[in-house]
Amino acid sequence: MGRPDGTTDAALPPSLVDRLTTLQRQAARGLATALAQDGCTLDQWRVLRALGDGEGHTMGELADGLQVPAPTLTRVTDTLADAALVYRRQAGEDRRRVLLHLSRQGRRRLDGLEALVAAHESSLLASPPWAAAAAELTGLLAPDGHARTR
């Protein structure tokens, strides 16, 4: 399209970050729908999964690791604690620190959700649009694994 100054609009080259963001949002939306059918949110599953390592984690560690705002994380963990899926315990060495742990019931819930997530991811990866997206992403990466320069 021409401009009054005689220049034209040119298509911008593909952006790795833009494409990854779009794909992440599509994948998260699909998974959130599948989890909702089982009465779980994406953030709840992510917290349960983070706690699935068997280590206690502070709210700060979870917020940083999951990239979830602290108020959202508080709401999510309160809901999980109310459902007896997680519990809070003071850290032994520093009683001012509170660690969040996965309960036995939370472990069973996480195991069931992981099966649902695995099925969703398998279906997603087998779909032609995602195969095309994988090829596109490979094309956006330089042979050394870094984003190609423009």
Image: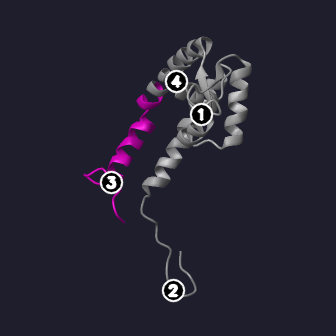
Residue drawn 56% across the image and 38% down it: 61
Can you identify the residue that label 2 sits on? 6
Q: Is 53 placed above or below 129 here?
A: above
- Determine the CA span between mark 2 and mark 1: 58 Å
- Determine the CA span between mark 4 and mark 1: 25 Å
Mark 3 or 2, closer to the camera: 3
- Determine the CA span between mark 3 and mark 2: 36 Å
3 and 2 marks in contact (CB < 8 Å)? no
Can you identify the residue that label 3 sits on? 146
N-term-proximal mark, 2 vs 1: 2
Label 4: state its secondary structure: helix
Mark 2 or 1, closer to the camera: 1
Q: Which residues are magenta?
A: 123-150
Residue drawn 55% across the image and 26% down it: 56
Disc 2 marks a residue whose amino acid type is Gly
Give whichever of 63, 20 is nearer the camera.
63
